[in-house]
Image: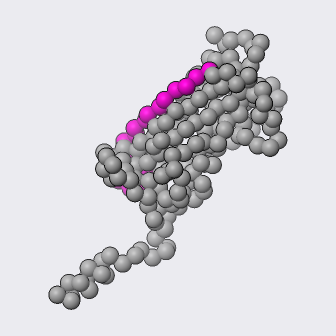
Amino acid sequence: MWLTGLLLAGCSSQPEESDITTYLLPQAPEQSAPALVTQQPILVVLPVEMALHLTGTGLVYQTSSTAVVQAQQNLWAEDIVRQLTRRINGDLRLKQSRYWPTELSAAIKTTNVPKLQVRVNAFNGHFSGSAYFSGEWILTGQTGDLKTVQPFNFQVPLKEPGYSAQVDALSEAVNRLTTQVAQRVSAVTLYSGERSSL
C-alpha cells in the first residue's frame, strides 16, 4: 500500500522550473515610412480591456462549459494587454492607410481625436480543439460620437495539441479581428469636415 502511495507521489511531483515556457504573441512588422505619420490623421488605439480571468501571467484554457484553468508552466513573456494593444496598433498600420493608429501616451492629447477601444471576453484555448477570441470593439469619432460598436467571435482550430499551437491560433484570431476593424476604419469618417473615402 505504501509503495503505491510512493509511486503516485513521484508521478505528481512538480515540474522543474526549467520546464517553464514563455510566449510572445507574434507582432506586426515595423513600418519604415515615418513620413506617413505627418500625412495621416491620428487614430488613438486605447489599451485593450481584458476580462479579469485573462489578465494573469499564464495562458488560459477552457476545460468545460463552466471551467477555465490558467497554465502554471506556460506563461506570457509580457503582459498580454500590452501585447494585444501593440499587435492591434501594428496590424492597423499595415492594413489601412487612411489613419495613423498610435497607442495612447502622455505625448498625445486625447481630446478631439478618434479612438478605438477593444474589449475582450475570451482569449483562450478551448476543449473543442480551437482557440477562442471574442468581445467587442468600439470606434468613436473626433468629437466622441459613436461610429461603430461591433461584437466579434472568432474560433480558430489548433493545428496540433499544445500551448504553442494555441498561441498561433490566437494570433490568427487577432489577425481576423484587425482585418475587420481596418475595413471599417477605411470606410468611416472620423474627423469633422473630412471627406468620406467612399
Q: Residue at x 32, y 76 (%)?
A: 12
Q: Where is residue 173 in the image (x, y as percent from the top left)?
A: 47, 38
Q: In which quarter of the image is the C terminus?
A: top right
Q: Residue at x 33, y 49 (%)?
A: 66
Q: Quadrant of residue 155?
A: top left
165 inside magenta stretch: yes
Q: Residue at x 52, y 36 (%)?
A: 175
Q: Where is residue 127 in the image (x, y as percent from the top left)?
A: 32, 49
**Depth order, front residue of 12/93:** 12
Classify 1 as above or below 110. Answer: below
Q: Residue at x 66, y 38 (%)?
A: 46
Q: Quadrant of residue 79?
A: bottom right
Q: In this picture, which residue range is highlighted in magenta?
A: 147-166
Q: Is residue 184 left or right of residue 197?
A: left
Q: In this view, does 157 lie to the left or right of 107?
A: left
Classify 38 as above or below 77. Answer: above
Q: Is residue 192 left or right of residue 19?
A: right
Q: Is residue 136 left or right of residue 142?
A: left
Q: Is residue 91 visible?
A: no
Q: Where is residue 61 in the image (x, y as percent from the top left)?
A: 40, 53
Q: Which residue lies furthest to the bottom in this view?
A: 2
**Depth order, front residue of 22/51:** 51
